[in-house]
Image (cartoon, rainbow, N blue to C red):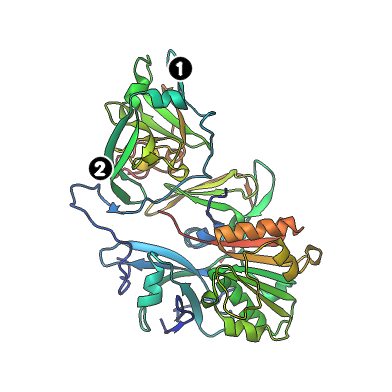
Amino acid sequence: MTDLTLDGNALAGLLAETLGADLTAAPRRCASCGRVSEVGAHRLYRGAGLVLRCPACGDEAARIAVLPDRLVLRLSGTWRVEVTRR
Amino acid sequence: MREVVAETGRARTIVLEVRGWPGHVAGQHLDLRLTAEDGYQAQRSYSIASAPEDEVIALTVERIDDGEVSPFLVDEVRAGDELEVRGPVGGYFTWRVRDGGPLLLLAGGSGVVPLMAMLRHRAARNSTVDTRLLVSARSAVDLLYRGELRSLADGRGLALHETLTREQPVGWTGFARRMDAEMLMEVGPPALARPRVFVCGPTAFVERGADLLVGLGHAPAAIRAERFGPTGG
Amino acid sequence: MAHITRGFKGRPRREADASSIPPGQYVVSDFPVLSAGPTPRTALDAWTFAIDGAVDTPASWSWQELLALPQETFTVDVHCVTKWTKLDTTWTGVSVDALLDGLETEADFVTAWSDGGYTTNLPLEDLTGGRAWVVHRFGGEPLEPEHGGPARLLVPHLYLWKSAKWVRGLTLTLEDEPGFWEAAGYHNRGDPWREQRYWND
């Protein structure tokens, strides 16, 4: 039975507001299975904080603590993020 | 809030004016943050229903029974109210005419909203790219944008398919069951045509749609999904 | 101060008597389901609970052996770091004191670990003195998988992330080893009455 989770699209606003860039289209190569998936395609879990997992194998891609004044991100796998310079 | 427009008995379109609006891409969403008098806050994301070419920004919200936010947006907000919004955001579940097709759009319930933005954008650009939309809803009263979808489907490369899973009106000629492989084969296009696929709706619908399509030979990388659902604790 | 949204009330909630719920919390009547990953499914005939690590004699119980231990049914309030509190939750399980009974250790710390890879760390002291249980029933019914079934750790005097769902064992350690959320930016101990949510609190 599949858990009814959301996906990385639901983090678009939080990440864009904090990091100044929309990450949902950023590809990540999974450290565990090698598959490349965009952030928006990753499964999103909500616990104390937020966890993104590879859609192919469930490996943890990001662990995000949401503090009142900051985000703490632990990222694994190979992320390719493009941010426009202003 | 510029105005509100009733869509169905349970859904309403909210038309907003946003200061400093940068424009958006079809498929993107807004985050709304609501604050009660005691400071309690709730936040929800709503897909933008309007095309980038439209002059207004429209969100279509469906009331979820026992919902915390949707009953407020459907029943309470009125023209002149101010809402705190963040966005537009989303760089993955988006489509522009220049991205090309063919397009296969699968909508579960209110999942049709971001896909409607794509279709309105397609129409505004006079694109005739081969596009197929399958909408799944419980009953006919839940179908959003029926009239507009019918007129968009009028001979300009858009094929509209509807399935009602719980009850169908007398004389119904659409599908009458949960989405399955046979239905998707009938809707097409085949995997050989390498369509760009967008699936949106409750997680269970999205997972089912993606699995069925992969089973029919579509490449997982060609399928983009956006899951709607409760935001947890 | 954020803009107040005219007419928005939010979920039914009450600021109960200020002294009876921890600071910054609001009371809910449903039971939100939070998780760091997919719900594990372990068959009861494959399930074991272990106490290992810095102990002279590791111990292990099968499901039947756990149920054969003295059981307690008790009612407590639980507090989640995401700010909801649920009052008067009733659980049935085995006191961690009973599980630790007779075990010799010099460890001061524990890592609770679960199916699916989740971990959380606690001082051993926080698991003793009648303050922690391995529970398998909620509200008189078997604990549902989404809420941590077949069994979870319950440590109600700390934030609920310390009450590891799908718990399979306690590893006693000489050094404190931050668990899943503690290593990510959440507080090492998590006392809701001192509002210890994050690492810099």
Chain at tag 2: C
Question: Residue C112 lies in what quarter of the image?
Answer: top left
- B160 is higher (above) or lower (below) than B201: below
Question: Residue B164 lies in what quarter of the image?
Answer: bottom right
In the picture, measured across the screen, residue B144 lies left or right of residue C55, that is right
| Residue found 54% across the figure and 34% down from its top | C43
In the picture, measured across the screen, residue C153 lies left or right of residue A79, that is left
Residue C145: image location, x then y, percent: 47, 42
Q: Amino acid at mark 1?
A: Pro
Q: Secondary structure at mark 2?
A: helix
Q: Which residue is mark 1?
A: C58
**Along the viewing direction, whichever of B102 and B95 lies nearer the viewer:** B102
Chain at tag 1: C
Residue C84: image location, x then y, percent: 33, 51
Q: Amino acid at mark 2?
A: Trp
Residue C193, numbered circle = 2
Mark 2 → mark 1, Cα distance in angstroms: 34 Å
Q: Quadrant of the C terminus of chain C?
A: top left
